[in-house]
Image (cartoon, rainbow, N blue to C red):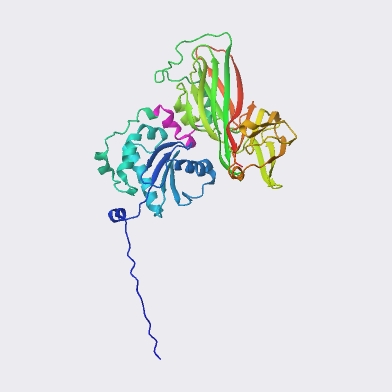
């Protein structure tokens, strides 16, 4: 008995798109974004269909807001991948929706930075460099990526194709906050043995004219009021994971000083023996009177103040511990009812009191009657807003509160897409970011007067939301 084997061979035609035939590869990059340290988009370019411009918000929330939890330079959500690198305070991100070789995309991102540095003539690209040369950088993107495919990356062949010229930042970088503060995380500080010399030495007025102080006023009583004002921002997901937590701060002053004094000022976030240690703020912006060289080398803010009220600086600082811990639990029961349980705990010191604490809790549309159980503060239902207001006039540090109530569930659709819980508060004499004024010294070379100084701290909620 013989066995006969029959082999049937199928020929399946492979259809290649015109783009693959032309370029010889699958499309690589759908979009490219450049962010600053705050997550603001400095450059954005869409090269192919398939992604929208608002995809940049996904990367900001998923990566930049969770900086300490980044484990990979590639983030994949569904069919969209974000391939990113960091350069100083900048993020350069390529977005793709195809199964590409990530190493090729990384090579392009690094070569794009290298071309940028060579075009501008610098070693480190900062936010100010991107803003000053955005026209050139957009041309570079258009010349180096065609329909998502990387093409010409040679600087010698790129230069003749660029119609815009790079901005000359060589002079301004030495006198601008953008040039000096880009290295805020790697500040080079001198020996603390030179502190008396730093405090007592006057500013070079020939190199630093001071039109903000045209006259030399005289006061019987010389006073300085320093205000450290911070706006707290927090966003957590439904599982309690923090998506972003930071403060936008500013330091304002009211200086009533005689003559033309030189002031030395420093802040910190912790207590240490080094008076210049601890101030970890980013995205700082200073008043034009500040000597940026002293800040870059010594973390010392040195300036000749305007007469009267002015804003010395603004900054942004990430915050690890929120002033309040809020635990919300919403569960259906009894067929058509919802049970709310909200626990509140303050985390700031026991000697500090928050005022006007208001927690807005969303309820289903049509809710008209609620029977609450609350052990601190007052409860109020605002039917027009579909919100429950839990208001606490004064809450001390390390204090706890609990609210519980039940409502009728009108729509199951509302349960699946509930608005977040929002919080507002005011904290006097307290910095949410734990900033402290270390010292403020006044030196007037022609006058020897005493200065009355006072410091005020104030924090409040700006955008404090908890998803449920």
Q: Residue 178: x, y in percent?
A: 42, 31
The residue sitting at the bottom extreme is 1
Which residue is at a point 33% across and 34% down the rendered structure image?
A: 135
Which residue is at a point 45% across and 37% down the rendered structure image?
A: 36
Asked if residue 274 can be seen in this view, the reply is no
Q: Residue 172: x, y in percent?
A: 37, 27
Residue 17 placement, left or right of 439: left
Q: 370 or 402, which is in the foreground?
A: 370
Say whether residue 252 is magenta: no
- Residue 137: name its quadrant: top left
Residue 381 versus residue 22 in the image, above or below: above
Residue 119 placement, left or right of 385: left
Q: Quadrant of the N terminus?
A: bottom left
Q: Quadrant of the C terminus?
A: top right
Residue 323 versus residue 440 in the image, above or below: below
Q: 424 or 115, which is in the foreground?
A: 424
Asked if residue 150 can be seen in this view, the reply is yes
Which residue is at a point 28% across and 54% down the rendered structure image?
A: 22
Numbered circles on residues, count = 0
Q: 400 or 374, which is in the foreground?
A: 374
Q: Which residues are magenta?
A: 174-190
Say whether residue 186 is magenta: yes
- Residue 293: name its quadrant: top left
Q: Residue 182: x, y in percent?
A: 44, 34
Residue 71 placement, left or right of 116: right
Residue 445 placement, left or right of 48: right
């Amino acid at each position: 008995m013989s066995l006969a084997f029959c082999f049937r061979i199928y020929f399946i035609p492979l259809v290649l798109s015109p783009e693959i035939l032309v370029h010889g590869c699958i499309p690589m990059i759908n979009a490219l974004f450049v962010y600053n340290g705050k997550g603001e988009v400095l450059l954005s370019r869409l090269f192919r269909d398939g992604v929208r411009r608002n995809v940049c918000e996904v990367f900001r929330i998923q990566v930049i807001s969770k900086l300490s939890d980044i484990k990979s330079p590639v983030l994949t959500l569904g069919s969209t991948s974000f391939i990113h690198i960091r350069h100083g305070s900048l993020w350069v991100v390529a977005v793709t929706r195809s199964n590409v070789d990530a190493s090729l995309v990384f090579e392009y991102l690094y070569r794009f930075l290298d071309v940028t540095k060579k075009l501008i003539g610098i070693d480190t690209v900062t936010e100010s460099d991107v803003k000053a040369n955005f026209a050139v950088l957009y041309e570079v993107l258009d010349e180096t990526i065609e329909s998502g495919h990387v093409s010409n990356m040679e600087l010698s062949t790129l230069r003749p194709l660029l119609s815009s010229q790079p901005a000359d930042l060589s002079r301004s970088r030495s006198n601008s906050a953008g040039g000096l503060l880009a290295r805020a995380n790697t500040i080079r500080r001198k020996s603390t043995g030179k502190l008396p010399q730093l405090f007592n030495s006057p500013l070079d007025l020939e190199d630093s004219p001071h039109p903000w102080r045209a006259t030399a006023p005289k006061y019987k009583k010389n006073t300085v009021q320093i205000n450290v004002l911070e706006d707290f921002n927090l966003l957590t997901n439904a599982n309690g994971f923090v998506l972003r937590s930071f403060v936008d701060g500013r330091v304002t002053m009211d200086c009533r000083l005689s003559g033309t004094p030189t002031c030395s000022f420093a802040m910190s976030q912790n207590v240490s023996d080094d008076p210049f240690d601890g101030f970890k703020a980013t995205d700082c912006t200073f008043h034009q009177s500040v000597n940026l060289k002293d800040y870059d080398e010594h973390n010392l803010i040195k300036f000749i103040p305007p007469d009267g009220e002015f804003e010395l600086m603004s900054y942004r600082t990430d915050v690890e511990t929120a002033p309040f811990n809020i635990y919300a639990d919403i569960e259906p029961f009894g067929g058509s009812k919802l049970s709310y349980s909200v626990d509140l705990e303050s985390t700031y010191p026991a000697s500090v009191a928050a005022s006007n604490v208001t927690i807005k809790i969303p309820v289903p549309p049509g809710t008209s009657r609620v029977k609450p159980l609350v052990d601190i503060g007052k409860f109020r239902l605002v039917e027009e807003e579909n919100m429950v207001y839990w208001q606490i006039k004064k809450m001390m540090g390390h204090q706890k509160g609990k609210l519980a109530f039940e409502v009728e569930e009108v729509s199951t659709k509302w349960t699946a897409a509930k608005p977040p819980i929002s919080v507002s508060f005011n904290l006097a004499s307290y910095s949410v970011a734990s900033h402290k004024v270390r010292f403020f010294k006044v030196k007037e070379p022609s006058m020897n007067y005493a200065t009355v100084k006072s410091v005020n701290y104030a924090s409040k909620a700006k955008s404090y939301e908890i998803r449920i």
